[in-house]
Amino acid sequence: MIQLKINGKSQSFQGDSDMPLLWYLRDVLGLTGTKFGCGASLCGACTVHKSGKAIRSCVTPMSSLAGAEITTIEGVGGGQLHPVQKAWIEANVPQCGYCQSGQIMQAISLLAKTPKPTDEQIDNGMQGNICRCGTYQRIRAAIKSAAGVQA
Amino acid sequence: MSTITNVSRRGFLTGLAGTGAFVLSARYLPEALWAETTPLGTTHAERSALHPDIFLGVDSDGMVYIIAHRSEMGTTSRTSLPMIAADELDADWKRVKIEQAIGDVKYGDQSTDGSYSIRSFYDAMRQTGATARYMLIQAAALQWKVSPSECTTDLHTVVHSASGRRLGYGELAQAASKLPVPRKEDLKFKTKDQWRYIGKGTKSYDLAELCTGKAIFGIDAHMDGMVYASVEHSPVIGGKLKSYDEKAPLQVAGVKQTVTIDPFKPPAVFKPLGGIAVIADNTWAAFQGRKKLNPIWDSGPNASFNSDEYKKELQQTARQSGKVIRNEGDVDSAFAKGGEVFEADYYVPLLAHAPMEPMAAVAEFKDGKVTTWTSTQNPQAVQDTIAQELGIPKENVTCHVTLLGGGFGRKSKPDYVAEAAVLSKKVGRPVKVVWSREDDMKFGYYNAVAALYMKAALDTKGKPTAWLQRSVFPPIASTFNPAAVQGEAGDLQQGWTDMPFAVPNLRVENGAAKAHVRIGWLRSVANIYHAFAVQSFGDELAHRAGRDPVEYLLELLGPARIIDLKAHGYPNYDASPEQYPLDIARLRHVVEMAAEKSDWGKRKLSKGSGLGIAVHRSFLTYVATVVEVEVSDGGDITIPRVDTVVDAGLVVNPEATRSQFEGAAVFGTSIARSGEITAKNGAIEQSNFDNYPVARIDEAPRQTNVYIVENDAPPAGVGEPGVPPFAPALCNAIFAATGKRVRELPLSKANLGKT
């Protein structure tokens, strides 16, 4: 049995400990805001936070998460809109929206480490998250707006 | 909910709280969410006090319900179409709820592709809104005992100005419902200056849910008691299963059983491919079980398909006479005269859609009926396909449409939905099918690979006196008829039959090619390779003549005129040529405007940088794009800036339109940089985003400026037309920067470096 916290709530995982966190969130807990895109840490759609840092839940086995504190898109605002989510809405970022949970979680993690990112730091911080609709220009603008830096 | 451009943010966010459609908490049942559209087969719109037609209802509490009958995959049509109806109704957008329609012929065409949504339903949406508004005015006038002509509306309220009396839509709905529904001829439509939303636009109805993880896509749908399935298909299309290990998968924790699905009988259409399904407690277990199947396949005739050889075949065919599609003047005599002749071959490979959400559906077969929840661009095709597979009437298939995590044409083909339905019947429970990314890459309905041959005879000034173009590609028709080898009018209308240049002697041809994979349509389809050849070749001629590419392009386009292609069987995207003519003046205008907006010829560019232009009409929309590229000494490219000018007639939702063209530049970047699907011995070689890369934030254009031409022409498409001119504009820019001409995509195969 693996004990961990998801969005502040204690959970006990019983099952195949090779199972990636993504499928525990989606299929067992019903937290479907975290998305499946590639299963191989190539697209970032499954990004969640472990102790506030972005990780790819599709390649993170449950066995590595004893005692972990996980935050998903459902919990990141603590019941309200996170400032980054507000910036996303303001900049009208999403098209289909499927990748945006992962984009937002990655951006929050980036801004926690780099509160005023340059364009290059945004490139480096966000290049692991694919948006097939091509909303990158608005993602960049939303990150800058949330960071309070000039677009 | 959702916002109108000038509504305060606070008002917008407050509005979000009340939104219904796709909001869910953790363990949801889609039934509860969309129940209104299911059990009685009625929508809330239909159950509202006033319900003049299938698309709209006004209830006594003043809520307005508008049906979104098209699929939402990111183009915002789910918002923009109801917004048109709301405008004609003079409704308060904050009191509008959007209901997603199930698949049902009563809504008319629901196949969300071809950039059709706005242009096909603009009139219908205006009519539905105007009809309800007419009836509400009539009801108020009766109550006030005044003439309806003395009454107007003001945001959800009927007003009698002379007396200052006002009645809200909710108060009038019941009385209005007793009145006859007016004929279309009697309706009074708003004039342009009265529009609240059309031409101004709103953000997506689902925006907040999309940013909070609450939006529901097909992969998120849930049915009580469902099991999860992952399906192993023959690596070669049409292969048949010989044997597999039935026991080993059952050793995987969570795996319940394996089930086979019969191979499809050609034509492929949208049928399930066939294969072995692993049924499990969760998606992960189903994926793991598949690894133990050890299947042995009889690959069949498509095992002979190798992309390298196939490419040579297409290129050889492109150098031989083909079927003549359009013929003007006498090309052969012009070439026979001697003088300078220039020819070039272009090539664009198979392309995969790779929407971020892989194919997914949940379906339940029960008592001879199927209920499914899925990300589909075409719910009526879901009904047809499942009905055919299971031998049940179409009416017995209820298809609920969720949001789509991208579509790009792939989700027009419901093979994966049919898999879920077939499996549910076999296992006796609801089944959720989730494709892996590898399944998505390997079992697509690919955009056709194409070889294109171009030949021009040039006068002393370098202008073409004769122009021959020949395209060769396996046609979409092959998916529906394996014998089909020739491009059909629907393929050839896309930038080939309608080649817009003014050349006295012109011949447009198409050669035959047999398909060995399922060929489908991907965002802008045949326009991708046709525009690449025509717009690259035009640029090559400009440079040969030592001319400025923009000036030369305008000369190629020739004088403002209407090109009449009726004699060539030109379908014109199913629009009347009177309403939507091929208008060279509009093509010229977007070129001139793109040159101006991009500071063409004036911009200071650094060494290794260049600008390229391309212009193209597709889906009745005229687009010119200027790309700025920087090529490093090592051959790496970056795209600092794109300027794209769009003439799509009346633009209903400018903000959504800008998003579509920003996205199209990124989609075009992916095609140009790295888009290539190949086959070896019939099996697709690519599997995931490592070997089928798509553009990432650091590779995409840094800044795409979208300029929308003010135009009162009827609305045209916006989802696709940004894609076709992008790749040629980029490659033309690369030539300007490096002197290297790219005739084959993707760029990842070209050496653009200095060594």
Image (cartoon, rainbow, N blue to C red):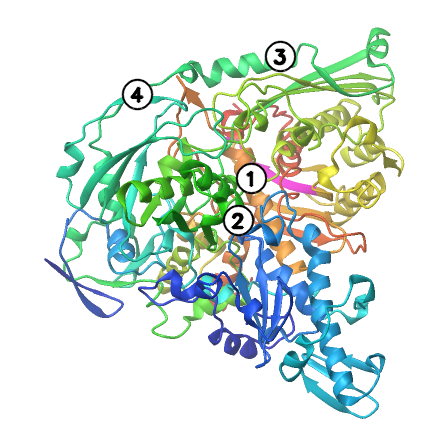
- Lower sequence index among marks 4 and 1: 4
Report the disc number at residue B669.
1
Nearer mark to the viewer, of 2 and 4: 4
Q: From this view, report whether residue B356 is shown above or below residue B320.
A: below
Mark 2, secondary structure of its residue? loop
Mark 3, secondary structure of its residue? helix
CB atoms at circles 1 and 2 under 8 Å apart? yes
Q: Which residues are magenta?
A: B625-634
Q: In the visual, does B725 lie left or right of B96?
A: right
Nearer mark to the viewer, of 3 and 1: 3
Q: From this view, report whether residue B217 is shown above or below residue B412.
A: below
Q: Which residue is disc 3 drawn over?
A: B317
Q: Which residue is disc 4 drawn over?
A: B297
Q: The residue under label 1 is which amino acid type?
A: Thr
Q: Which residue is nearer to you in this view: B596 or B136?
A: B136
Q: Indicate yes or no whether the magenta region holds residue A147.
A: no
- At which x and y percent is residue B330? 86, 14
Q: Residue furthest left?
A: A1
Cα distance between the residues tagged 3 and 4:
32 Å
Q: Can you see residue B169?
A: no
Which chain contains the residue that carries disc 3?
A: B
